[in-house]
Amino acid sequence: MELKIFTPEKTIFQGEAESVSLPTPGGVITVLSKHTSLVTSLSAGEVKIKSENGLKTFLGEGGVFEISNNKATLLLRSYRN
């Protein structure tokens, strides 16, 4: 899937991802390529991105995630490496 991750200050990630794991109010979800359309709020917690370059993790401080037509966008309030 094409994944873009933004904070108010900058773009954190832009590229192809095999999966992304996200903390939501209902628990952690993992979204794979070609996932059905989804919009969800995010809780503070660990975000994991798996791509051909390996696994990237960081702590997100909440936000919103949306995926549609194999294009995903993650808007974070802030993050820490």
Image (cartoon, rainbow, N blue to C red):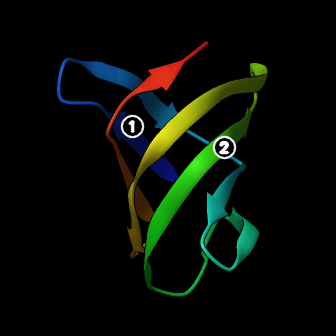
Secondary element type, mark 2 = strand
Residue 53 percent across, percent down from the top left: 74, 19
Q: Amino acid at mark 1?
A: Ile
Could you tell me the amino acid type at mark 2? Gly
Residue at the spot of label 1: 5
Is 1 located above or below residue 60 in the figure? below
In the depicted structure, whether residue 17 falls above or below residue 36: above
Q: Give the numbered dot on residue 45.
A: 2
Visible in this render: residue 70? no
Distance Cα–Cα, label 2 vs label 1: 15 Å
Q: Residue at x 72, y 23 (%)?
A: 56
Q: Position of residue 10 (x, y in %)?
A: 23, 18
Picture residue at 75% right of the left edge, 72% below the top: 27
Report the side of 73 relative to 56 (left or right): left
Seen at 76% across and 28% down, the residue is 52
Placement of 78 over or under 1, stated as above or below:
above
Tell me the quadrant of the picture where the C terminus can be found: top right
Q: Residue at x 29, y 23 (%)?
A: 11
Question: Looking at the image, is mark 2 or mark 1 earlier in the sequence?
Answer: 1
Badge 2: residue crowd in 10 Å (few <14, some 14–19, many ≥20): some
Residue 34, placed above or below residue 19: below
In the picture, residue 78 is in which quadrant?
top left
Label 1: how many residues lie within 10 Å, few (<14), some (14-19) or many (20+)?
some
